[in-house]
Image (cartoon, rainbow, N blue to C red):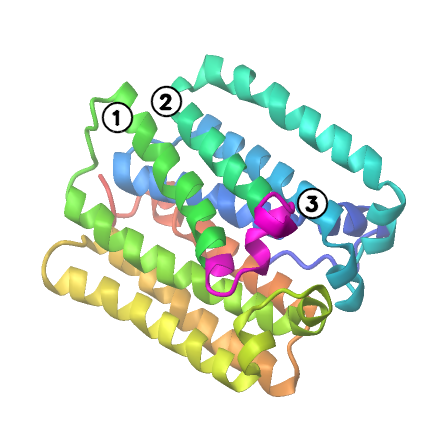
Amino acid sequence: MPLDLRYSPPVLRLLASISRLHIVAIACLGTFTFGWAFTGHRLWLLSAVCALDWFLVNLLNRVVDHREDQANAIVGTDFVARHRRAFKVSGLLALFLSLPAVHLLLPAITPFRVAGHALGLAYNWPLLPRGRRIKQLYFWKNVASATGFMVTVFAYPLAWAWRERGFALAPGVSISTIVVAGIFFFLFEISYEVIYDLRDAPGDRVAGVRTYPAVHGPHVAERIVDALIAGATVTLVVGYALRIVPWHLLVFVVAPVVQLVVYKRAVRRGITSGDCVRLTWIGAGLLALYHLPIVLRLPVGLP
């Protein structure tokens, strides 16, 4: 079952909300899972670095999202506002100290870490002309966020494989496989983003964030989510039919189907912050379940 923090101690729930633990978990498991699927290796250290990176991105995001988080009743918003300077200084310090430290252990991913965090800062902070953030830009907001996940989930393990293994890939995996899987993941991840935007529409309007729900309304946004889920599903199925995608990657098609069912139920009764967090934990749980055949040594997936 997905982790449910509703009945956890207040301090734990506060920390989980401030760090957006659900996003950290799904990103970390995504790196671990796709890294194993592409390379045949369990990249524990790389996944831990991914968790650190998303923790820092989310922490620095919370520092500047006070208005919209307050409008959307996100847990921990007032606490972050009271300690904004401490969060800002400690987050930036941890980020800059981690760059050389991680480089000593995993030099292959340093260019992607730098690019990813530069994207994260421009996404969250008003660094663009006229003091704008990428988050405020129609269409590009979702593309930038999905690109951030592509950097950690795809680029990190592939960069590691290039440097440490001469780009030796797992059986049944080719460059074409990675391209098809990348298209699937990109479309599917953006569908997550738009679902979150449905929840955040009131706060986004307050903060001038031009998401699809804020600009076009919830019904158009729901159709966009449906199209993205359908596109992701079809991409993977067609890739398998063309013998580009192996079976152990085709099983990822379960995720968009589950997401469609869960998000439709949430929308019918009025989507909440808890629904989005729960949906993300379900995704993380599915990624964890993907490794169950390895534990049981069943004859599926990679040898």
CA neighbours of label 3 inside 10 A, class few (<14), some (14 to 19), many (20+): many
The disc at residue 162 is 1
Instruction: Indicate left or right for 79 with 5 as reference.
Output: right
The amino acid sitting under disc 2 is: Ala
The amino acid sitting under disc 3 is: Ser
- Given the current orientation, which residue lies at the most extreme top position? 104
Instruction: Indicate left or right for 141 with 231 as reference.
Output: right
Mark 2 lies on a secondary structure that is: helix
**Location of mark 2 (residue):** 108
Q: Position of residue 280 (x, y in %)?
A: 56, 59
- Given the current orientation, which residue lies at the most extreme front position? 130
Q: Position of residue 154 (x, y in %)?
A: 35, 41
* Residue at point 52%, 73% (across, down): 212
Mark 1 lies on a secondary structure that is: helix
* Residue at point 40%, 48% (across, down): 292
Instruction: Indicate left or right for 161 with 199 as reference.
Output: left
The Cα–Cα distance between marks 2 and 3, rounded to whole angstroms, is 26 Å
The Cα–Cα distance between marks 1 and 3, rounded to whole angstroms, is 31 Å
